[in-house]
Amino acid sequence: MAFIQTSPYKVLSQRTCSSFRESTSIKLFYFRGSPSAKAFSLLNLTHYATGSGEFCSSSKRRSRGPVMAAKKASEGAKQEDGKYKHTVDLPKTTFGMRANSLVREPEIQKIWDENQVYKRVVERNNRLLCQGNFILHDGPPYANGDLHMGHALNKILKDIINRYKLLQNYKVHYVPGWDCHGLPIELKVLQSLDQDARKDLTPLKLRAKAAKFAKQTVQNQMASFKRFGVWADWNNPYLTLDPEYEAAQIEVFGQMAIQGYIYRGRKPVHWSPSSRTALAEAELEYPEGHVSRSIYAIFKIVDTPPTSSGFLKEFFPDLCLAIWTTTPWTIPANAAVAVNAKLQYAIVEVQSLSEDVSLSAGNKKQRLGNILKESKKPFLIVASDLVPTLEAKWGVKLIIKKILSGSDLENCRYIHPIDNRECPVVIGGDYITTESGTGLVHTAPGHGQEDYVTGLKYGLPILSPVGDDGKFTEEAGQFSGLDVLGDGNIAVVNCLDEHLSIIMEESYEHKYPYDWRTKKPTIFRATEQWFASVEGFREATMNAISDVKWIPPQSENRISAMTSSRSDWCISRQRTWGLPIPAFYHVQSKEPLMNEETINHIKTIIAQKGSDAWWYMTVEDLLPEKYREKASDYEKGADTMDVWFDSGSSWAAVLGKRNGLSFPADLYLEGTDQHRGWFQSSLLTSIATKGRAPYSSVVTHGFVLDEKGLKMSKSLGNVVDPRTVIEGGKNTKEAPGYGADVLRLWVSSVDYTGDVLIGPQVLRQMSDIYRKLRGTLRYLLANLHDWKADYAVSYHTLPMIDQHALFQLENVIINIRENYEKYQFFKIFQIIQRFVIVDLSNFYFDVAKDRLYVGGTTSFTRRSCQTVLAAHLLSIARAIAPILPHLAEDVWQNLPFQYTMEDGSIAEFVFESRWPTLNETWLAFPTKEIDFWEKILELRTEVNRVLEIARAEKLIGSSLDAKVYLQTSDASLASRLCEMCAANNDVDTLHRIFITSQAEVFPSLEDELISHIPFSGECLIQGKSKVWIGVSRAEGLKCERCWNFSPQVGSFSEHPTLCNRCYNVVDAQPLPAVAMTN
């Protein structure tokens, strides 16, 4: 019966060292057995375990005889069951199978701290001939609460990079930072006080409480970052509230002011009524589901320009401009209606009102205005392309009476429907389209950026009758005191309708800017603010962006789009907790006094006393000497700087001031939201003052979502807290503590360039992978318990299986290094999972157990294997160290031998050991040998399939019960297989590779040769070499010590139950070996 099975076997080859080479072949099996034998589908074969269990045990079909016999004896079994137990070299190590991370990781961190390991490694790299500086500049988290999973992702990614660079012998200087000013901290303080305490709160008292809160939060967050295993200069972090930092920030501000990039003006900005301050774009969020009260309103035209031919007057006095707005509350500030000169407009007559248009459709509530209920309908001007759309929406018939261009409407005059002012029709920009609305835009220069620009062009008044609290001022007349986003909005709509100026009102769902702190909607409002003129250095900024390496590459498009389109940066805030804008104002004229002398004087004061000095020192003391006699004419400004200006100056305050650091940084790494935040504010301040970007490369990561891809929120109950992941929750069964390394392993496993998922299932998977990796490392440690470097076997005398193992190891380390350099850690995770956990355990470790345990303590076969295991242990420990530092250090502290560096020093800690040196000899493994071992590994997989069938049919139990037969017409392959059967070193023999007692290569398939073989099959190796495989019971008797079958068992009178190999080992080893102690 034929079976077809595709079974790829992956192996690293020299020709494809940067990626796994996959060889896929089709296997054609013809199994034969006794007449009653059952046919088994290969698709349902049980795969043996990979790296699980004690010392990476394999499946039932693999022999664990020496281990089991010795363990039984050591546990008190009968003497005859373990007669030779003391001659077996069992694995032995103090390295626990269980990580016990909640205890062991803090112990390791204590070892690092007590021995100042981070400092030692950095100083050593500084002393030695090294790769140079590597500066990853830390983006400051906000000091106002506990850390979330996004913080963990960010800081662990940074730590992986820094630790790798340390191993690469770079001078790594990582200074952690915190953003300590701003509204969130101020609000936290205010929320902690009762009403009476707030009344007595002076600015200085508030600032003192805010500083105390921020510093305490910094300590709490720092402790959490340390628990993540993050290395940094924790004793010398940068805080934006430190006087030296503030002075450097004032210096940046001053340089921009001197160059003319800082100015004060009245223009619309994002204003948060809930916070009572201006906001930058980076301080906004746009949640889904916001519903505005939109209106279609009409303004009656009363005059046309003298240059017009009078064709509009035939429609007087009932000709109106139709506009659409989602902010009716801005109508009192209306100063013009803007049209697009390139669009076609239609004068339409309104007819035939439909009776059912007032009905609601879902949540899109609609209400017709009173004007449509009048018998006499107005003539309206709308974009001609929108006539069909507006007919359907309003439920009326719009009859086109005349077509005209937008330019024909310029300088027409209309009456403001509320206060009867005459206002003009103006030409706007390309923002006026026919995608929505009417094609005519209500223009209020005090409440919109595009409106403001149009207003400057036409000299329109900048009206903004709204106060800091978001309520109409007295300037708004009848609406005074009403909340513009609440009752004020309703009142304006009702007023317009009373004046027959509403066609339709409807609910409109869209994205709307919210204050990211208070989670409440904002408004556009013209106020006196300080601005940075981005236009003055926009071109230089765009050029600098192209000189930076962006990872992933598409993030360059993101920041380019945001920078090219951004308006001037509003840098002033109306808050107390922040760095003051160093401006003085003339008491009468309100003109600001701010120049190089005054700014430098303030910088000197703040450097010595901190920014509190602005509040407790007098104007006379704050002004330079030459201005003091006029001090009474001036007052201090009350504005503070945008916190994005704070953090955006960190390159100057840290890179430009700290010893060992330099400008620009090699790398910035933050979340993708920082394209409009820290990446951009840092870029703008740096370009304005230094003429270049503050970073050479930028890496961005996505957001952390739950396992279903949903945003985490307390209301959904899907928040994954990094502290709980590490330490466990109240219910340890539902939320066990995994330790920091499992969290770090998760970070390495995800493609962080997009949004990443985490949850209980993901963490369980990571924990299982971590456990298997730990098991692999324990296997290595335990089998090197008696190893010394002096025992190493020279490469050229190693068996071919060992040389091939070292070739694979070297290629893996090269591959891992390449991906560290590219910051593609998820590929490293995949390599580790495939090679360390699966490939090594499934093949080399499986085969190695025989010679390690029963080959003889000092035998060549055992020492050669230990040579390879030592190389693997030292390389793997260092390769995983940046990702899993606690595990790597735990391994290093349990090394049964010392690791000596090239300079003769001892590497006491894993990060003192440096990255594995490239071994050209190992890489020079011959190409023909690479191809042959690929065939051998594939052949072994096929042999295992036949062994499985034989075991399922009860012919054999363990694979050592079997003898394997091979035959192939491929002469070259047959010759090599015969050579392996007769190998001198006992390691490269086929039966050791297959873990069977014997293996034989037939020259042909004559009946007399194969008739006694109960199970057989055929396969194609690499799709071309057909190989016949047979399995029978092994010949001879079972050796009591190694459990191999051999005809020689019974030949030695002193040890009648031993095979020849075991007899030689026991005869040469009179003293018993020490059994393993866990």
Image: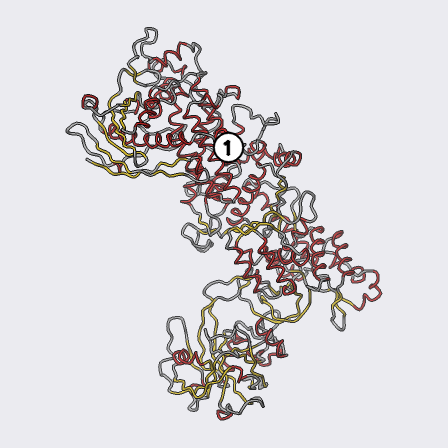
Instruction: Report the front residue among 14 and 160.
Output: 14
The residue at the point 22 percent across, 34 percent down is 40
Question: Is 344 situated left or right of 980 in this image?
Answer: right
The residue at the point 49 percent across, 47 percent down is 721
- The kind of residue on which mark 1 rests is Ala
Tell me where residue 814 appears, x and y as whole percent. 49, 36
Tell me where residue 1036 appears, x and y as whole percent. 27, 15
Question: Is 489 situated left or right of 970 in this image?
Answer: right
Tell me where residue 644 appears, x and y as whole percent. 62, 57
Tell me: residue 359, above or below residue 1023.
below
Tell me: residue 676, above or below residue 836.
below
**In the rendered image, which residue does mark 1 sit on?**
877
Q: Is residue 729 visible?
A: no
Instruction: Report the front residue among 972 and 608.
Output: 972
Q: How is the image coloured?
A: secondary structure
Question: Residue 50's quadrant in the figure?
Answer: top left
Badge 1 marks a residue whose secondary structure is helix
